Image: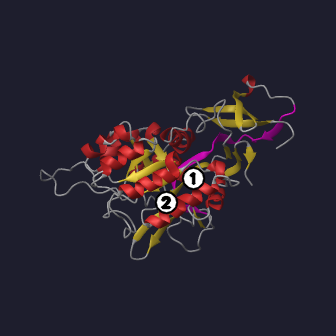
Amino acid sequence: MSESRFQAIVNAKLITPRAIVDDGIVVIEGERIADCGPKRTVAIPEGAAIIDAGGRYVGPGFIDIHCHGGGGHWSWEEPNAFALAHLRHGTTGILPTLVYNQSREEMLAGVRTVLEARDGPYGPAMLGIHMEGPFINGKYGAVTSPIRPVDPDEYGELLALAGDFIKVWTFAPELPGQAEFAEAVSKYGIALSVGHSEADAETIFSFVRQGLRIGCHCTNASGTTPSPSRYGGTREVGVDEAVLVHDDIYAEVIPDALGIHVRPLMCRLIHKTKGTDKVIIITDAIDEAGLPAVPGDPYEDVRFIEGVGLSGSKLTMDRAVRNMMRHAGVGIVDAFAMASLNPAKALNLDREMGSLEKGKLANLVVVNESIEVERVLLRGEPVD
C-alpha cells in the first residue's frame, strides 16, 4: 500500500446488490470502504493511490460457507495455505469446513488448528468454522463410517473450545437428541444447516426458531422423497422440497461445470423457487480445488471415489459463480448476491461485508465478463 492511507479504484463497473454502476469509483481508507458510487458523486482524496480497473467489474469478495480444502491442503490441517488458495480466486471470506467422517479426536484437533491459524497471514479471510456433522444420518454421504449418535459430551466440548467461532453446523434433525443439541448451539448464534438427512418438513420447520436457516448442498445427500407414498401415484415432501418452500431457509448450491452435483435445470428451479435472495453458492471443495486440471479427467471440477461415487468438488468460487450464471440463466448482479451478500447474511456478518457499501471492509475482487479474477483485496491489502 502507498504511504497514503487512501486508495481509489477508478474506471470500474461496480457490482451492487441490485444493479451495475458504470464508470464507478471505490475509495478505500485503510481496511474499509470510505466511499463508492458513480464517478460524479465520489471525491478522490488527495494523494490516494490509484488503481485503474480498466473498465472491468469490481464487486465484493466471494464468501464460501462450505469448503473443505484447496490448493492441495485440507482446511483443518493447513488453514492459511488453504485460505490463500481460495483468496487467489476471489474468496475473501471462507469457513474451513470439517467433515462428518472424522473421528471425535480428529475434529477436536482440526478445530484447534483453525483457531490457532486466526493469527496467521490469511486469518482475516477465515470467518469461522463450519461443522458438517458428525451428527448426521448415516444413510447419506460419500463416506459414512465414523458417523455417530448425538453426544452431549462431544458437542459440549466443541462448543467450549470454539464457541461462536463455529458459524454453521450441519445436522440431521430427525435423530434422537437433536432438540437438546439445537438448544445448546442456539446460545452461540450458530446457523444450523439441515443436511445428510431424511427429516420430514414438520421436523425441519420446528428447528427454525433455534437457528436452522440453511439447506446443506441441496439435492446432494439430502434424503429422498419418502417412499412408498401414503397415496399411490403421488409424491411426498422431502428435505429439498421443505428447504425450497420455507421463506427463512437459504438453499446451498454446488454449481459444477457439468451439472453433476446439481443438474442445470435444477439450478434454475432452485433459483426460480427461492429467488436470488435465498440462494447461496458454495464449492464444497476438497484439497484438489484450485490445482491445475488433470489431463484427460472427464469430470473437470468434481471428484469421484472408486466404489463410493461423487465426493466433493474441485471448484473455486469464481468458477462456481460462472457456472451458476450459465446453469440458472442469471446475470452478474444476481450471481454476486448469491456468492457474497447472501452468505454474509446467513452468518449475520452483512454489516461488515458482502456488498459494496461505505463503511464495510474492503474485501474486493476485480473480474472480467467471464468472472476471471484479475485482482483481490483483503481488508484493503492486495493478495499476491
Q: Which span of residues is magenta-colored?
A: 47-70
Q: Is residue 16 above or below residue 63?
A: above
Q: Residue extending furthest left?
A: 231
Q: Which mark is residue 26?
A: none
**As drawn, is 363 to the left or to the right of 195?**
right
Q: Is residue 191 above or below residue 307?
A: above
Q: Is residue 204 above or below residue 84?
A: above
Near-viewer residue (350 or 76): 76
SS type, badge 1: helix
- For mark 2, what is the residue? 98
Near-viewer residue (220 or 95): 95
**As drawn, is 224 to the left or to the right of 134?**
left
Viewport quadrant of the N terminus: top right
Q: Main secondary structure of the magenta part?
A: strand
**How many numbered callouts?**
2
Which amino acid does the dot numbered 1 rest on?
Met
Q: Which mark is residue 317?
A: 1
SS type, badge 2: strand
Q: Residue at x 48, y 41 (%)?
A: 346
Task: Give x and y (percent) for residue 83.
Answer: 63, 56
The picture quadrant where one finds residue 250 is top left
Of marks 1 and 2, the one in the foreground: 2
Viewport quadrant of the C terminus: bottom right
Q: Is residue 45 above or below residue 251?
A: above
Is residue 308 visible in the rendered image? The answer is yes
Is residue 218 visible in the rendered image? The answer is no
